[in-house]
Image: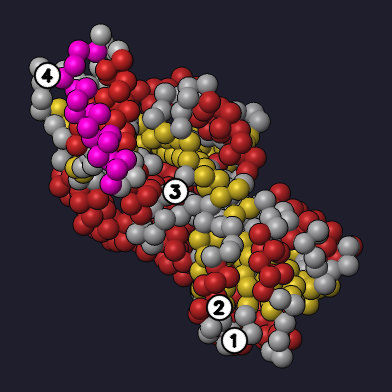
Amino acid sequence: MVTSKTLTIESVNPANKEVLGEFPVMSESQVKEVVDGAWKAFEDWQIMDFGKRARYILKLRKIIAAQSEDIAKLISQEVGKPLSEAYASELTGTLDTCVWLADNAERLLKDQMISLNSPILSTKQSVVAFEPLGVIGVISPWNYPFSIPMMTILMSIMVGNTVVLKPSEKSTLVGIKIGDLFKEAGFPEGVVQVVTGDRVTGKYLSEAKLSRLIFTGSVEGGRKVMQQAANGIVPVTLELGGKDAAVVLPSAPVKWTARGIAWGAFTNAGQACASIERLYILKSKNSEKFLDELVNFTKELKVGPAVDPNVDIGPVIDQVQLDKIKNLVDDAVENGASILTGGGVIEEHGGFFFEPTILTNVNNSMRIMREETFGPVLPVMIVETEDEVVDLVNDSEFGLTASIWGKNLKRAEDIARDLEVGTVYINDCLFSHASPQLPWGGIKQSGFGRSHSHFGLMDLVNIKHINIDAAGGSSRIWWYPYGPSRIKMMAGGLQAFHGSFPFGKLSGLCRFVSNMAKKPK
């Protein structure tokens, strides 16, 4: 929330609407000053060896682990996440990233020698070096306010970059805590800094002098960030929305799969870009039984404030999100959908709560099947064939993740290879965002670029090719001057290397050798 009388933002607990704090909306000049400081810190940080950077990160790991209870409570308080989810989805992946980077980054970013297969290039050596880019801007979301920015920051600084983080205005407290943790770990001043504010502050960061900008958020937000970064030709990595589908095969165990699907749909109150937001059940003798089990299991989930340790589903982030969810459910019902459970706002707790909801009698033309809901709502279709289910899953503007559930793993993998997404899970969902070894990212309007893993590291470095020629002082056959003999030599060389065997190659070799000694003109 942005206050109108002064340039500040308020952090609000979504479970009870309590104001947790008020923070400045930083100006353009303040953001520039922070970015300038990051560039200054980069001068020394980039030349520090991997071992020293790893020691900083491992010290940070110990501090996070020691403060994990307080961090989990802060996350839960500011965004409404149940404590069990704060530990599992926010802290575990962050700590694992510290270890993975310390153990593997230097090996993964070691110089690579590239061999050249052409004999005429035999005097050359090629080296590929991976060098830090400079200052990385990170604009992070509120739904995973700790793990998303932390895992990105850790990878960025491990390769030698410095970082300026702009957290969501809805999770400013967590963003400030991230900055404090790096200070406690003794990182040099300017290596990791935090700027606070709203979308205008984000605009100032997007337009600043950066080496790369990493944005996680909505499609519309990503579009604006690209436009803002374009003037400076700043490359961007975008992790945007999703409308992720789950496919249940006839071989799927009923109770176990129902539990997994429910978690994938309702964890974090459905506020994950990889939440299961569409469910397609392949028709079989068990399809109705599975749907009944899913509905019954959903009815048992407890909704409420995260201060209750027995709560399964917390609030959504604010009134705007609550209204959006309600609007999409109402629109689906008006167009023929049926509510099997849930469907309404819960007012008794005093916060922004919505019942976990399951809908049937939906189709892919409905808004509920096409727009990202970002709430605890699961529309379900029973589908006749595998071909139809592949078409339905791919009939989306988004392409982040999908999941397939069943004991027949070969059948599941065959379907997985036909789906237009960045990640396909078989018999699970969502978890891989917390695994630093695995790539994360999507296609279509889910964004582009990859975070995490070796592939994510490649987004954070300059891949520099260095070519060394040992034959200094000698001429190159492709240099000036040209002439008839040079043309014959080059044409003969082409046939010698790539012509038909044996006559084309022998003829070409003769033409090549006989014209090498002749003057071009």
Q: In the picture shown, does residue 31 fall above or below 187?
A: above
Query: Magenta segment range?
Result: 502-520
Which residue sits at x=77%, y=68%?
A: 343
| Residue that carries the numbered disc 4 in the rendered image | 474
* Image mark for residue 444: none
Measuring from the top left, give residue 224's x and y in whole percent: 61, 33
Compute the Cα span from label 3 to label 1. Answer: 33 Å
Estimate how packed mark 1 is, as few (under 14), some (14 to 19) or many (20 or more) residues with alpha carbons within 10 Å. some
Reading the image, the residue beneath label 2 is: 411
Q: Are marks 2 and 1 in contact (CB under 8 Å)?
A: yes
What separation in Å lies between label 4 and label 2 (alpha carbons)? 60 Å
How far is disc 2 from disc 1 in space, using C-alphas? 10 Å
Report the predominant secondary structure element of the magenta stretch: helix
Three-letter code, disc 3: Arg
Residue 251 tag number: 1
Q: What's the distance in space between the residues labelled 4 and 1, CA to CA?
A: 69 Å
Residue at (63, 78) in percent of width and height:
248
Image position of 233 with respect to 422: above or below? above
Q: Nearer the viewer, mark 3 or mark 4?
A: 4
- Local SS, label 2: helix
> What residue type is disc 4 on?
Ser
Q: Along the line of sight, which residue is nearer the eye, 361 or 146?
A: 361
- Measured as percent of width and height from the top left, residue 70 is found at 38, 59
